[in-house]
Image (cartoon, helix red, strand yellow):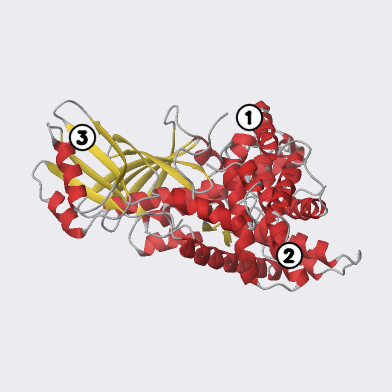
Amino acid sequence: MTTLHDLMNAPAPASAWVLAQDCAETGLDPADIRAEMRRRIGEMRASVERGLASDARSITGMVGWNAKGLWDAPDVLNAPLLRRVQAYAMAVNEENARMGRIVAAPTAGSAGTIPGALLGVADHLGLPDERLIDPMILAAGVGKAISRRMFISGAAGGCQAEIGSSAAMAAAAVVELLGGTPRAAVHAASLALMNTIGLVCDPVGGYVEVPCVSRNAFFAVHAVSAAQLALAQLESFIPPDEVVGAMASVGRLMPAELRETAEGGLAQTPTGLAVTARMEGRGEEGGMIELPMV
Amino acid sequence: MGVAYTSPMSLLDMIGPVMIGPSSSHTAGACRLGLVAHHLLGEAPRRASIGLHASFAKTGRGHGTHLALVAGLLGYAPDDPRLPRAFEEAEAAGLTVEFRDVDLGDVHPNTAHLEVQGDTGRVTVQGSSTGGGVILVTHVQGLGVNFSGAAPTLLLRYTDAVGMIARIAATVAADGVNIATLTCTRAARGGQALVAIELDAPLSSEALAFLGRWPDADWVRLLPKLMDG
């Protein structure tokens, strides 16, 4: 299976090489993968649009209005790319939290990062969705190379495994979209990963809402930052595969309380515990809870 | 260094699945477990009893795990927009479901045990949702198996006897289909045995009908590929 080192040294564009390798392994037809990837970009696009337009609350009532709130607010920083990337990312994760239709990338909890970064940059620059197919294939290739060495789930490796992977995948995709080399794309992924190491998974009540929704906004921007550094030829001092190994080892050192069990961190704050108690007190789906005022 | 996946993952496993939120493991994976039971029952489900283990029991409700399992039983894929309304759809379809918390022992925390009855048949399925919407089915009809639904899978229950595996493999080969993986378990020597064969392509209806006519095979099913990657 492909390593990040292999990817980094692949002939440009890296996505073409990733696609050829994948089809050799799985026996799938490259044209089918490209067509399906195009369809999934459309699904991502639709989830962004629904999320930006809706302020309906999630199952718990903790999230639901953040993406629309940011999108409708004045751009006081005069930073349209920043606002777009953040709003797109949260739009997808709020759709996810209200049981809308999204594309896991690589997981549902981290589903906003890639659309936030990649669709956000493309829209900022006025690039059509057809241009996103190859970068998305490279993103998937980076995810596969990471999953070769670690489980991509919060339960196995903490949030670093989920949002770190999605940010690394997004960073590489943005680099390819902007014409960067395979080397720059993989270094962008590595920079994104090494600056995510240690992040725990401590969701309030165990729900994919807090901090997951805002976290996708932060890490979509993180991915764009990594791409910016790598496109300026900055590199990860630690080789990319070693960074993945370091992240995997930190995941193994992480106590179970901080790996998606809601037994530590934000989940165990007084407010987090109050939310959990109220949700467990309810028997059925639907409805909302009164949030404690803080 | 742990290797995350034993079989090659497709790029479409990384950007995907397209799914109803909020959790790839607790929603999409749960739906696929229900879908396995749906296909293996092979008729409209009427009654289901679903045991939820560990994390599925503890945090399932807020993740739509119950809805997703029922959606799967109704034959809905993880991206079906009807998934959030699965309870109402089940009622309309005449399906009654009960949930219980169970301790299935030393298994993955996201594991469910499903007993499903139709008008004529009954199926039991136990499986785990291992992350990103990927599942691993570990028991069917009470016997051990090991398949993911990523490939068409032939299941055949028969009376343990010399040469059965060879006959089954020969039938699959005569149909021009390659075997990817095969697991076989039995309750006892000469007792009930179950073979689960992951295939590179679906078996023809003729081959399936041929297997179904064997007097020593009492249950044959072809699970279609559940992943679109």
Q: Which residue is mark 2?
A: A120
State the separation of the CA atoms marked 2 and 1.
Answer: 35 Å
Chain hosting mark 3: B
Q: Residue at x 59, y 53 (%)?
A: A140
Asked which secondary structure carries label 3, the reply is: strand
**Is A212 above or below relative to B43?**
above
Mark nearer the N terminus (2 vs 1): 2
Q: Which residue is mark 3?
A: B193
Q: Residue at x 45, y 51 (%)?
A: A24
Question: Along the horizontal axis of the image, is A142 left or right of A33?
Answer: right
Residue closer to the observer: A264 or A199: A199
Specify whether residue B8 is in view.
yes
State the separation of the CA atoms marked 3 and 1.
Answer: 38 Å
Closer mark to the observer between disc 3 and disc 1: 3
Residue A256: give its label.
Answer: 1
Classify mark 3: residues with Cα within 10 Å, few (<14), some (14-19) or many (20+): many
